[in-house]
Image (cartoon, helix red, strand yellow):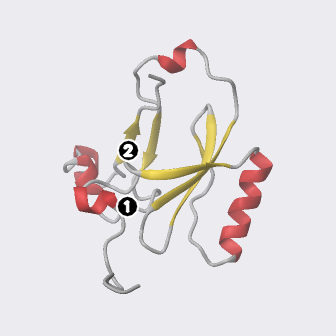
């Protein structure tokens, strides 16, 4: 396209200096079987995909598009209830497992990371 450089940063996360998991697109897989099928399909195309991540209320797989934008396929595994609307730590996962190049940027030099333990990302998925 005239006037558009062939190489440019398309991801908002890098421009803001935050890990890619902060801003991403998630797509509904429909079911756990659909999620597994999507993971197999992506892997067959040579795309690096995480293992299935169990969030208690949903399961997800994560991968990146060619521009480095974080993408997710997800399926609900249970109905949400009033407890899900409370602000609280919901997910704890290794930042390395999510494919973050710089775990320290997320953890701020998390003490566990300095001791050699994997740093973890905490995310809140409470309803507003």
Q: In the image, what residue occupies the spot 32% across and 59% down?
A: 12
Residue drawn at the location 34% of the way across and 49% of the way down = 119
Residue 18 in percent (x, y) is at 27, 53
- Disc number for residue 75: none
Residue 104 horizontal side relative to residue 47, left or right: left
How many numbered marks, from 0 up?
Answer: 2
Specify which label sits upstream in the sequence, 1 or 2: 1
Q: Residues within 10 Å of mark 1 (few under 14, many from 20)?
A: some
Residue 110, image x, y percentages: 23, 46
The quadrant in which the C terminus is found is top left
| Residue appearing at x 41%, y 28% in the figure | 89
Question: Where 38 sits versus 43, above or below?
Answer: above
Q: Are marks 1 and 2 in contact (CB under 8 Å)?
A: yes
Q: Nearer the viewer, residue 97 or 87?
A: 87
Q: Quadrant of the N terminus?
A: bottom left
How packed mark 2 is, by other alpha carbons closer than 10 Å (few <14, some 14-19, many 20 or more), is some
Is 118 situated left or right of 31 in this image?
left
Nearer to us in this view, 81 or 98 = 81
Residue at x 34%, y 66% (from the top left corner): 101
Could you say where residue 14 lies in the image, as x and y percent from the top left?
A: 28, 62
**Which label sits on residue 100?**
1
Residue to which mark 2 is pinned:
121
């Amino acid at each position: 396209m005239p006037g558009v450089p062939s190489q440019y940063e398309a991801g908002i996360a890098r421009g803001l200096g935050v890990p890619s998991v902060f801003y991403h697109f998630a797509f509904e897989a429909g079911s756990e079987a659909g999620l597994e099928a999507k993971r197999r399909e992506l892997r067959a195309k040579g795309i690096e995909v995480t293992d299935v991540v169990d969030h208690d209320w949903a399961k997800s797989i994560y991968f990146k598009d060619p521009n480095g934008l974080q993408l997710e396929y997800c399926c609900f595994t249970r109905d949400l209830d009033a407890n899900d609307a409370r602000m609280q730590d919901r997910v704890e996962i290794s930042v390395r497992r999510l494919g973050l190049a710089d775990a320290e940027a997320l953890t701020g030099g998390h003490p566990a990371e300095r001791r050699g333990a994997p740093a973890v990302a905490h995310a809140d998925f409470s309803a507003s």
